[in-house]
Amino acid sequence: MSEVILSKLLIINSHIPKSYDVDIPKHLPNFSHSPSKNLTLFPIMLVTSKPIVVVTGANGGVGFGICQRLLFQLCQAHPSDALPQSFSPRTQDEDINNSITYDGITLIMACRSTKRAETARKDLYQSLDKHVEMLRALPNYDGHAQKFRKNVDIQISYLDLASISTVLRFSTEMSLKHPYISHVIFNAGVASFSHIHWPDCIRQLLSSPMDAITAPTFYVQHKGEMSVDGLGWVWQCNLFGHFALFRAVESLLAASPIGGRVIWSSSLEASPKFYDSEDWQLKETEHSYESSKYQIDLVAITLDRYAAANSIKPIRHFISHPGVCSTNVSAALVNPVLDVLKVMLFYIGRFFGSPHHTIQPVKAAIAAVHLSLAPLIFITFASGFTSTNGKHSDANLGLKPVRFGAGTSRWGEEMVGLSDVKDWDKHAAEGEELVKKCNALFESLKSEESTRVDSETASERM
């Protein structure tokens, strides 16, 4: 275990990041929504163990943005993304593991395309070096960025979430290379879009233009696509592959000296509207994307509550979403001209008050990075479970669980907001059933894979 050295006190006042109030659920405690009033006094903690962070789908889009933002934030001795948001409680609890200064990081890019990942890693190092030089030029530069940069190790590891064998090989590789994993950010995801249904598109644009560019309902999706494991392809890529990865590296997360965190990536489009619990692998639905993202909400909250109720040092699970970001997820739907038009509409939506249009991946990453760096007291109060002095209390388990969403102001200033998990009361039991089914399926596939590997090894020895 690493030494935790208490240094000095810091008063956080007007620098506390803003949050878009429109998403703060009404059931949460009535904390101040004004950053200027939310004055927080807390000790600065220096943790000598560096984080070991796994990001899936890190070679592009929001995944790349998460990696870049995380590196840029940790170049600061006191990362701004770690500060309490305006919805966070005020506290002076001396046991809080507050603003953490890291002198390095091991960042593991878990990607299906290692070639693209190599290019992305090169870009990350180059952008990081430029950022460090920019910080060095500031008048009050404290030297931390250079020290941090010397201890940055960006690694690439092959991972195909649609294949349980690669998930298990990835976990074996991690256990051989690293003594622990501190964070896993489940960013990777797919959508099996087929085409745009133009009559529905025009209808939604005319009747509800903001919804049309925020959570469109006119995308037509393929159905019945299967993975190499014989599971629903979208379901495995978005939910089960990540669930299996968590289970496979669970012991490494539990070994983290700074506490293990799992950040799941949901979506504004996550909805129970199209979800049929009988089709839990989403093989038959025409809305596999929205349904898989809603399943993520249910599973993440269920796992967090299980861990919180049964562990003194639980691995925490949180839900983030990137808002509306321009990535290649919709590449099958639009040509270059429509893509430009799409981005223009995003900016128009932001200008007219939408807090959800982050547009750029590095801005869309703020929620995931905040959940990675913020002291637990500032994020667990809203998740329905808190702890003090290692003694857990279920006093808040009646609270509806929330998601932490990336957002921006009209002028592009990043912030984090909260939103309820939709219809949690109606579907909480379904979350428990999903976890049980995923656990049973994981154990079954792991056993089959172990038998196959043993058989191949025996054949090679003959």
Image (cartoon, helix red, strand yellow):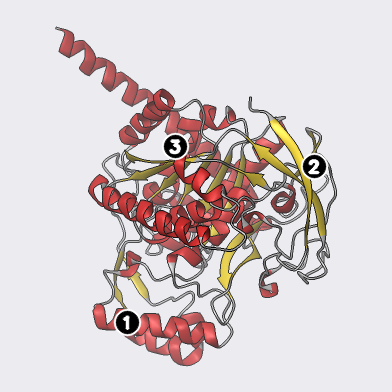
The amino acid on which the numbered mark 3 sits, given as a three-letter code, is Ala
Q: Is residue 83 above or below residue 56?
A: below
Q: Residue at x 60, y 55 (%)?
A: 370
Secondary element under disc 2, as helix, strand or loop, is: loop
Pick whichever, 241 or 356, lies toward us. 356
Q: In this image, 243 relative to 450: left or right? A: right
CA distance for labels 3 and 2: 27 Å
Kindly identify which residue carries mark 1.
340
Whether residue 292 is visible, yes or no, is no
Crowding near the residue tagged with mark 2, few <14, some 14–19, many ≥20 C-alpha atoms within 10 Å? few
Residue 14 appears at what percent x and percent y?
A: 75, 68
Q: Nearer the viewer, mark 2 or mark 1?
A: 1
Crowding near the residue tagged with mark 3, few <14, some 14–19, many ≥20 C-alpha atoms within 10 Å? many
Q: Residue at x 65, y 36 (%)?
A: 307
Crowding near the residue tagged with mark 1, few <14, some 14–19, many ≥20 C-alpha atoms within 10 Å? few
Secondary element under disc 3, as helix, strand or loop, is: helix
Q: Which label's residue is closer to the chain start, 3 or 2?
A: 3
The amino acid on which the numbered mark 1 sits, given as a three-letter code, is Val
Pick whichever, 284 or 9, lies toward us. 9
Pick whichever, 210 or 157, lies toward us. 157
Q: Residue at x 55, y 43 (%)?
A: 262
Secondary element under disc 1, as helix, strand or loop, is: helix
Of the 4 image quadrants, the one containing the N terminus is top right
The amino acid on which the numbered mark 2 sits, given as a three-letter code, is Asp
Residue lying farthest to the bottom in this orientation = 206
Q: Which label's residue is closer to the chain start, 2 or 1?
A: 1
Kindly identify which residue carries mark 2.
394
Q: Is residue 253 above or below residue 26?
A: above
Residue 286 appears at what percent x and percent y?
A: 37, 64
CA distance for labels 1 and 3: 37 Å
